Image (cartoon, helix red, strand yellow):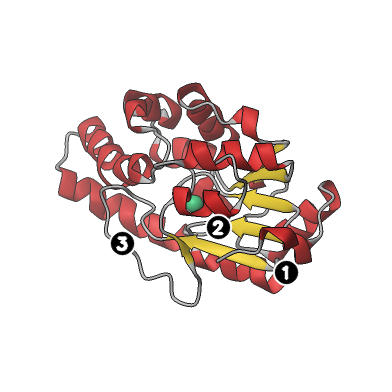
Amino acid sequence: MLNWNTIDTVLLDMDGTLLDLHFDNHFWVEYLPQRYADKHGQSLAWAKQHIYPLMQRIQGQMDWYCLDFWTRELDLPIVELKREVAHLIQLRPDADLFLQALQKSGRQVILITNAHRDSLSLKMERVELRTWFQRLISSHDFGYPKEEQAFWHALRAEVDFDPARTLFIDDGLTILRSAREFGIAQLLAVRQPDSKGALRDTEEFDAVEDFSSLCPSLTVEC
Ligand SMILES: [Mg+2]
């Protein structure tokens, strides 16, 4: 599927790509509204009615990914609440094998995430990811999410890579389209970002069905 001879750099998203999106989905869709309802002595339905429209309005924008924004907006300690369900943070199947194979192959491997630094830290406490990457980049460092071209220009200024010889894997289709517009040559979506969710139609993009299927073409050791 991929011609690894034409790939020097691999850019990888975190949530829904390397990590099971079930944690994030459960937290934002169920757990946070429940805790908001508890705080106000209201029903879960009331809390969802309050929170969901706000989420929809800012989806894909920097605030959507910003824990400081949500802490302020909902007056709830978001990082602490996330910690309460942190046992749900886990790698997607065979993501570690894939990362190991990438490292052995000697390619430049960089994590690029829209996750806030506090989210990133919490996830690093639960899952050892740091070791596989030359760099861990949060879009909050640049002030633009991956959905915007400004992110890619900032990344290019910060990291030496050739977009024409780069593979990028992300579960977000809007983000993949943004990467394509910038000129990233090889793009893959993710078939099942949430282990409890349905298989997704990834539209014009090929998708990672499972990481073990990418490994054999990468190195003989995998
Ligand atoms: Mg993602």
Relative to 215, residue 162 above or below? below
The structure residue drawn at horizontal position 59% and vertical position 39%, both measured from the top left corner, is 221
Q: CA distance from mark 1 to mark 2?
A: 18 Å
Q: Which of the 4 quarters of the picture holds residue 2?
A: bottom right
Q: Quadrant of the N terminus?
A: bottom right
Instruction: Give neighbour class at mark 3: few <14, some 14-19, many 20+ (Cα, 10 Å).
Output: few
Q: CA distance from mark 3 to mark 1?
A: 27 Å
Secondary structure, mark 3, is loop
- Residue under circle 2? 61
Residue at far bottom of view: 204
Q: Position of residue 197 (x, y in %)?
A: 27, 54
The structure residue drawn at horizontal position 68% and vertical position 73%, both measured from the top left corner, is 181
- Residue 182 is marked as 1
- Residue 166 is marked as none
Q: Position of residue 62 (x, y in %)?
A: 58, 52
Q: Position of residue 154 (x, y in %)?
A: 78, 54
- Give the camera-side residue of 15 and 27: 15
- Residue under circle 3? 199
- Give the camera-side residue of 11 and 77: 11
Q: Earlier in the sequence, mark 1 or mark 2?
A: 2
Q: Amino acid at mark 3?
A: Leu
Q: Earlier in the sequence, mark 3 or mark 2?
A: 2
Secondary structure, mark 2, is loop
- The answer to whether marks 3 and 1 mark residues whose Cβ atoms lie closer than 8 Å is no
